[in-house]
Amino acid sequence: MESALSKHLFVYSSLRKGFHQHTHDYIAQFFSFVSPAKVKGVVKNVNGELFATPGDDNSFIEGELYKLNDEHDFSYVFGQLDDYEGLIVEHGEKPLYRRELITVHKDNGEKIDAWLYWFNGDITGKPVLPPGERIYSNS
């Protein structure tokens, strides 16, 4: 496992390469794809929007693992991602997400620490996206 200064990022939705949006283009500028991976958690569908939350030991979110190309870019790049994910808010507002260091399970069985953006709101009772269901578009 890596230290709390991990240069890895786990993505599960709009930041994935299959999403074909400007958000992934940003990731591709600063990160290199490492492998498909998964983390313990669930993805819930709230009116067509997908939100990840931590889950029990039996539920996993499939996604992609990336590594920051240049460690000197860490503050800038993660600052930009924090802004994109709604962590930077006005006084009195609640951040939409929180960035947390989590254990990622690579396809080869290796475990590595990486940053993940968890949804920071209450989505109790919202439908869970079934494991393996596609959460991005290849178009």
Image: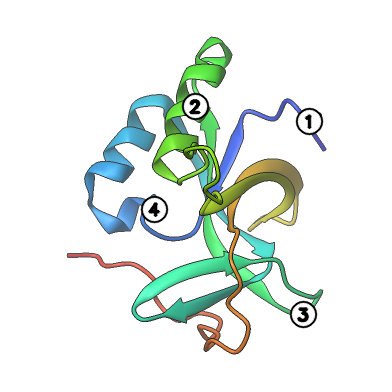
Label 2: how many Cα within 10 Å (few below 14, some 14–19, many 20+): some
Instruction: Residue at 73% x, 25% y: name it.
Output: 5
Whether pointer 1 and pointer 3 mark residues with C-beta atoms closer than 8 Å, the reply is: no
Query: As shown in the figure, which amino acid type bears the numbered disc 2?
Result: Gly
Q: Position of residue 23 (x, y in %)?
A: 30, 44
Q: Is residue 94 above or below residue 2?
A: below
Mark 2 or 4: the one toward you: 2
Pick the front one: 51 or 41: 51
Alpha carbon distance from label 3 to label 2:
32 Å
Among the two numbered marks 2 and 4 on one chain, the one whose residue lies closer to the N terminus? 4
Alpha carbon distance from label 3 to label 4:
23 Å
Pick the front one: 98 or 69: 98
The residue indicated by pointer 1 is 4
The residue indicated by pointer 4 is 16
In the displayed structure, does residue 109 sit left or right of residue 129? right
The residue indicated by pointer 3 is 58
Q: Quadrant of residue 72?
A: top right
Which structural element holds mark 3?
loop
Alpha carbon distance from label 1 to label 3:
25 Å
Q: Position of residue 24 (x, y in %)?
A: 32, 44
Among the two numbered marks 4 and 1 on one chain, the one whose residue lies closer to the N terminus? 1
Which structural element holds mark 1?
loop
